[in-house]
């Protein structure tokens, strides 16, 4: 009888030890990011443009948090990485393309036949963005197990998917910030979708802050900049996001310059 009670207690202890909810938390954060991405498509279908943009930016926030949570809890896994890529494809590849397409087509003035033809033409830009995003994510996953040269430490290969989605959304952000309807032109929107897609699929070096170490003497300056950004985001979100997007584009050639400089130094002065 005692042996039976002992064995039952051992089984209970084993099952108790096997219950670990920590690995589920980062995946739930990823699912939340995916839910916001899909909800952005729903908002766009109903013409709620501000909420559609807001949901994509919320998806960016949760996409940032899921990786941090996985590393903090020590539960990073290949499954989580694949799930994150699928979420990114929907939230930053499909959702922005659908949103910008519907937003730009809403103001296009065509007759019945011309409108049907234009709808097919401009949809190509949304498809192009999604395909480029898928290419970028597939390449990122394929390079996870490969060691990159040291000069790639502070750079991404191509524009990350969340930043690419932000670039794709820049026309609607500029339109909301300035009130100028010209930003809603389908040709202008199509250009930004193509530009964003090309930058995501490219191998152009862009800024990566993961391994950036800022000296403590600059901590106060960074706090002031951070507080100013938050104040601007709450006080005038469209203007703040516009400045952020334009600033990011202007940073790309700067990143290319420093990347080539670091690469030249690594190879002993010759490329």
Image: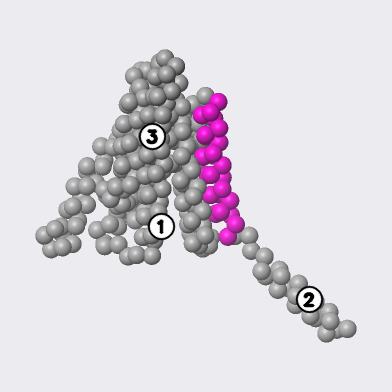
In the picture, measured across the screen, residue 109 lies left or right of residue 66, that is: left
Per the image, the residue denoted by label 1 is 141
For the residues labelled 2 and 3, the Cα–Cα distance comes to: 63 Å
What is the magenta segment's predominant secondary structure?
helix
Residue depth check, mark 3 versus mark 1: number of the one nearer the observer: 3
Per the image, the residue denoted by label 3 is 124
For residue 41, above or below residue 6: above
User: Which residue is pictured at 28% across the width and 57% down the height?
Assistant: 152
User: Which residue is pictured at 45% across the width and 21% down the height?
Assistant: 106
For residue 42, above or below residue 135: above
Per the image, the residue denoted by label 2 is 9
Residue depth check, mark 1 versus mark 2: number of the one nearer the observer: 1
The image quarter in which residue 195 lies? top left
- Answer with mark 1 or mark 2, whichever residue precedes in sequence: 2
Relative depth, front residue between 68 and 40 = 40
Q: x, y percentage for residue 65? A: 49, 49
- Answer with mark 3 or mark 1, whichever residue precedes in sequence: 3
> Which residue extends farthest left?
269
Q: Which SS class for mark 3? A: helix
The magenta stretch is 23-46
For the residues labelled 3 and 1, the Cα–Cα distance comes to: 26 Å
- Answer with mark 2 or mark 3, whichever residue precedes in sequence: 2
User: Which residue is pictured at 26% across the width and 62% down the height?
Assistant: 149
């Amino acid at each position: 009888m005692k042996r039976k009670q002992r064995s039952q207690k051992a089984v209970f202890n084993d099952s108790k030890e096997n219950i670990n909810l920590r690995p589920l938390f980062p995946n739930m954060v990823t699912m939340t990011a995916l839910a916001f991405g899909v909800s952005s498509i729903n908002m766009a279908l109903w013409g709620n443009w501000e909420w559609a943009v807001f949901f994509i930016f919320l998806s960016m926030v949760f996409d940032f948090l899921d990786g941090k949570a996985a590393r903090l809890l020590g539960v990073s896994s290949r499954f989580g990485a694949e799930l994150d890529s699928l979420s990114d494809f929907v939230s930053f590849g499909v959702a922005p393309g659908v949103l910008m397409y519907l937003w730009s087509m809403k103001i296009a003035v065509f007759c019945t036949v011309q409108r049907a033809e234009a709808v097919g033409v401009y949809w190509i830009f949304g498809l192009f963005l999604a395909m480029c995003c898928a290419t970028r994510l597939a390449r990122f996953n394929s390079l996870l197990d490969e060691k990159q040269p040291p000069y790639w430490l502070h750079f991404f290969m191509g524009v990350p998917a969340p930043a690419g989605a932000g670039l794709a959304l820049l026309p609607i952000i500029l339109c909301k910030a300035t009130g100028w309807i010209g930003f809603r032109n389908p040709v202008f929107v199509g250009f930004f979708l193509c530009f964003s897609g090309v930058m995501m699929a490219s191998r152009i070096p862009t800024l990566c802050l993961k391994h950036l170490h800022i000296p403590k003497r600059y901590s106060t300056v960074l706090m002031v900049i951070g507080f100013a950004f938050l104040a601007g985001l709450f006080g005038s979100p469209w203007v703040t996001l516009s400045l952020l997007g334009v600033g990011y584009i202007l940073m790309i050639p700067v990143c290319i310059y420093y990347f080539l400089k670091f690469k030249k130094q690594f190879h002993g002065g010759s490329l």
